[in-house]
Amino acid sequence: AQPVEDAAADLLEAALAEADGTAPVEAAVRRRTFAVISHPDAGKSTLTEALALHGGAIGQAGIVQGKGGRRGVVSDWLDMEKARGISITSAALQFVYRDHVVNLLDTPGHADFSEDTYRVLTAVDSAVMLVDAAKGMERQTMKLFDVCKLRGLPVLTVINKWDRPGLEALELMDEIAEKTGMTPTPVLWPVGIGGDFRGLLDLRDDSYIAFEAGSGGATRTVWTRMGLDEGLARDGDVLATAVEEAELITSSNGRHDEESFRAGRTSPVVFAAAVLNRGVEQLLDILVETAPPPGDRPTVDGAVRHVGDPFSGQVFKVQAGMDSNHRDHVAFIRVSSGRFHRGQGVVNARNGKVVGTKYAHRVFGGTRTGVEDAWPGDVVAIVNASGVRVGDTLFEGRSVTYPPIPTFAPEHFAVCRAADLAKYKQFQRGITELHHEGVVQTLRSDMRGEPSPVLAAVGPMQFDVVSHRMAGEFNCPVQLEPLGYQIARRTTSEHIPALSRVPGVEVLTSLDGDHFALFPDRWRLQRIERDHPEIVLDALAADS
Ligand code: GDP
């Protein structure tokens, strides 16, 4: 496998180096930066790995050991992830495909980490919505789709697991239309019902892509493209049925149209079996051909930063403790404009401080490689970037600030105390770090009369991460005592006295200075909204 990986690495190195005279705009045109959204078990890790196989980033699918002895995946690496068989952290997979640099940003699969996924979705230009053919549109897929919609991200749809019996293809199209409001416009229609996946009808040129029986799995699927006549001679009735179905769906939904896809009105659809590498290469083709490249980005003051402007980027993720041998702090930046060059000093727009970029890396799974250059759409991991927080804008030249990354409304709250009171310093350091990484939000109140903060999370598993990392990394085991609140609303300081007088309601202040009113249930919230319309109670972003 090694020579394949080396060749792919060389290709990527060459693409990232570009020529010295290359304009960032030219580099941007050849970038595709996307994320996969799906419900757990739809096959996201499998698809990621299959894409990595086609990009040559790994020589063979399924070579990395993990997840309780079953076939492992390169994107799962943290101890806790392995133990739980879920993916908590996100990283970026980068490879060259058809002269394009493909950046696939990994998203955590578990709903409790949807806030991390949300942050990743601020760093991509499109999303692939992965749907299990037997299950259709599941809850978590819908939640993440809503976030894409909110951000105006174009969404491609992949119906996965077509090698197994599932729902009917036309039925799936109806369900997608009904639940997302997007019109699905198939590009690759399946030949053969679920469980008998013979090939794909390519609606771009009405040809037939016939899979070689028995191929695919750990290696690429072997396929042959042929005209419909030849296909009908080979797969007669089955292909005829697919042609008929495709006619039905295209006459009602139309064919894939790039403009309406990019506007979020339609979603091109591909059928696949990621585990057999079927449809994966075709998906990459479609991404390269039709998904949007990085474009100009809106800034906080309503202007735009052009891709061709000097370097700028936004931190969408901060992670410490990635390398258990030495404590480190890694900031993941999506390049939005210009050329990033390792070693150049960049300015953090939040505090005007210069951030060193000597330790710039590309990180996927457990591997890190040094990065010399990066271009719009690429992700750079800067090691030892302490003081850099999620949402920060880094830039060179003319100053720029990107809009803050919105947060989910927390729904779980717990008081956090050091198990050993003598370890107060470690406790403070750890909690502050985890807050700035966005692992949880830390809230305090003078009214509580004790130094222990209240932690707020979208999902309870975030608390497990806190316990795990406080003990392992900061050498300070903690005790968490759950509080009975279920809803948080952002408020302003002048309303604190009035809210504090309401029985059962408490106002806390986050480390960032935001004030949150916590409510035990929505009845209490609704009553205050009704009785005191003057009180500012903002639902947080993505909560609506
Ligand atoms: P994730 O939770 O979305 O990352 O899902 P995984 O990639 O871990 O896949 C969940 C399960 O579905 C695993 O047992 C995979 O082997 C299986 N799986 C993934 N893709 C396919 C597919 O195309 N066909 C079949 N039959 N199984 C698949």
Image (cartoon, rainbow, N blue to C red):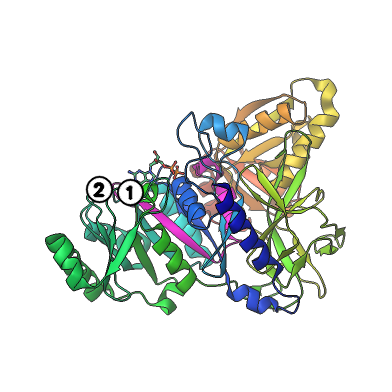
Under circle 1, the secondary element is: loop
* Amino acid type at mark 1: Lys
> SS for tag 2?
loop
Q: Nearer the viewer, residue 378 or 397?
A: 378
| Figure quadrant, ligand 1 | top left
Identified at 16% across, 67% down, the residue is: 232
Residue furthest to the front in view is 3
Which mark identifies residue 161?
A: 1
Image height of 461 relative to 188, above or below: above
Mark 1 neighbour density, 10 Å: few (under 14) some (14–19) many (20 or more): many
State which region is magenta.
109-136
Q: Which circle's residue, 1 or 2, is located before the other in the chain?
A: 1
> In the rendering, at what x and y percent does residue 353 appear?
87, 59
Q: Is residue 229 left or right of residue 486?
A: left
Task: State the separation of the CA atoms marked 1 and 2.
Answer: 8 Å
| Mark 1 residue's CB less than 8 Å from ligand 1 | yes
**Disc assigned to residue 166:** 2
Q: Residue at x 81, y 70 (%)?
A: 396
List x then y, in percent, for residue 427: 79, 30
The quadrant holding residue 375 is bottom right
Q: Position of residue 301 (x, y in %)?
A: 71, 74
| Left or right of 469 in this view: 327 | right
Q: In this rendering, which labeled residue sits more in front, label 1 or label 2? A: 1
What amino acid is found at the position of numbered circle 2 in the picture?
Gly
Residue 468 can be seen in this image: yes
Q: Judge by depth and name the residue closer to the eye, 518 or 429.
A: 429
Q: Which mark is residue 146?
A: none
Packing grade of label 2 (10 A; few <14, some 14-19, many >=20) is some
Mark 1–mark 2 contact, CB under 8 Å?
A: yes
Name the quadrant containing residue 358. Answer: bottom right
